Amino acid sequence: MAIVLSMAMALALPLPTRAEQNVRLTPDQMREDLVVLRDTWLPRDKSFDDAKKRDFDRVIEAAFANADTMSEADFALAIQKAAATSGNGHTTAAIGALLRALPIRAWWFADGLYVVSTDEAHRDLLGARIEKFGALSSAEALVRVTPFISGTGTRVRYLSAAFLTSPDVLKAIGVSFGDSVTLTVSKDDRTSEATLAPAASRAPGDEGQPTKRVYSILVPAAQDSPNRWPHVLDTVDTHSPAYAARADVEQHWLASDQQVLYIRSNSINSLDDRSLQLKLGDVIANSVVAKRPRAVIVDLRFNNGGDLFNTILFSQALPKLVPSDGRVMVLVGRATFSAALVTAAMLKGASQGNVVLIGEPMGDEGRFWAEGDDITLPNSGIKVHYSDAFEDYENGCLDPEKCYWPTVAFGPRGISLKPDILIDSTFADYAAGRDPVLEKALDLAK
């Protein structure tokens, strides 16, 4: 979460990794990378206890034994599976460059897994619910893919929406034996099968990383995007401001009397040259202090995190600066992770009895391992992140020898990060342009 930039990094031109060049790996090269993962990376990650280390060793031993027959995708998934034995959401591998994708994008709603975007050739699948992957039900496929995904059950549900639309992943969990995948789908009270081959190209905005910004599945690409994929929301005249283009911070007044301020953030890092701390300071000074809204809605549902230092002052100040009878409603969800979760926790910790969390459970518990750094495996170029600092944003932590120091200095104590009002939206609501979470916040603001 903490970010350190050097002038050399800022000026350097990035060179493609072996993974990005799609260079064929030999079995010996795979084994060399596995040794680095085991002997160099694992000792630096503190989220593994003894039992998890034994699980890690079993995955590594199996990969060693199977290296002669593994594809690059099989190898990448073995690396990811090894990292996932930690059970820690920050301990993971960037393997997307080695995985292919199907020509659909899907999302778990309260009532199932639905196709929300496709390439042009498969637009008839828009709005279809995926009942089966091959012979596996969607629920069974979710169970099968769980060992490949780092983190809590909520985090697994979130990231599985991307993992389950990769033919390489589906092959690894026993859905298929070749490149094509047969799905059983239901739409308009009819059930049918669709056999899909890997997509020729990814959807605009899809960065090829199943652990990066999966929430972008829900956000339609701009109409002028090259090779744009059709989207479920294309037929909706108006939809929630949550499904707008990515922003570090933006604000709107949602009531004609300018008494309900809506603040949306998709990143706890600035997306331009101006500091995010200064941007949030302007929101506090010019919108909260100057205009005294009776309610402030902070939407962190589609925020994977960034640098927690960017929001500490904002989070400490906001609950104390709304009117005495005002409210701060923090919208959270499965994509709320890392520094975004910390921001929600600090808002709750600074509450004057006026902060309410609304939405789904967030993408991590209040206690987790984070910080750390990446190690790049020498042959595959896969970046594997290790976590080396413990953080506790529910019980709190008093010892900087045991916990990441900002947790000790600024972290709340004795709070719950479970939503005060739990809402998991249905596909019908989403497809109609409705946002029950934001609607509930507006209800409370009246």
Image (spheres, rainbow, N blue to C red):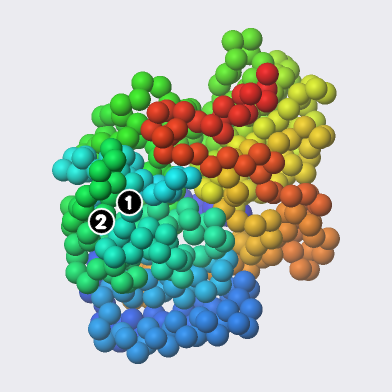
Q: Are marks 2 and 1 in contact (CB under 8 Å)?
A: yes
Residue 57, above or below 120? below
**Residue type, label 1:** Ile
Q: Residue at x 49, y 59 (%)?
A: 156
Q: Nearer the viewer, residue 275 or 387?
A: 387
Q: Residue at x 83, y 60 (%)?
A: 398
Q: Which residue does the numbered mark 2 point to in the structure image?
A: 183
Task: Spot the residue most to the left.
Answer: 121
Quick one: quadrant of the C terminus? top right
Q: Quadrant of residue 198?
A: bottom left
Task: Spot the residue most to the front.
Answer: 189
| Image x and y of residue 441, in percent | 63, 28
Residue 227, above or below 139? above
Q: Residue at x 36, y 60 (%)?
A: 137
Identify the element where label 2 is drawn: strand
Q: Which residue does the numbered mark 1 point to in the structure image?
A: 130
Q: Residue at x 61, y 61 (%)?
A: 371
Quick one: quadrant of the N terminus? bottom right
Q: Tally the numbered discs.
A: 2
Q: Which mark is residue 113?
A: none
Residue 419, above or below 14? above
Left or right of residue 265: residue 78: left
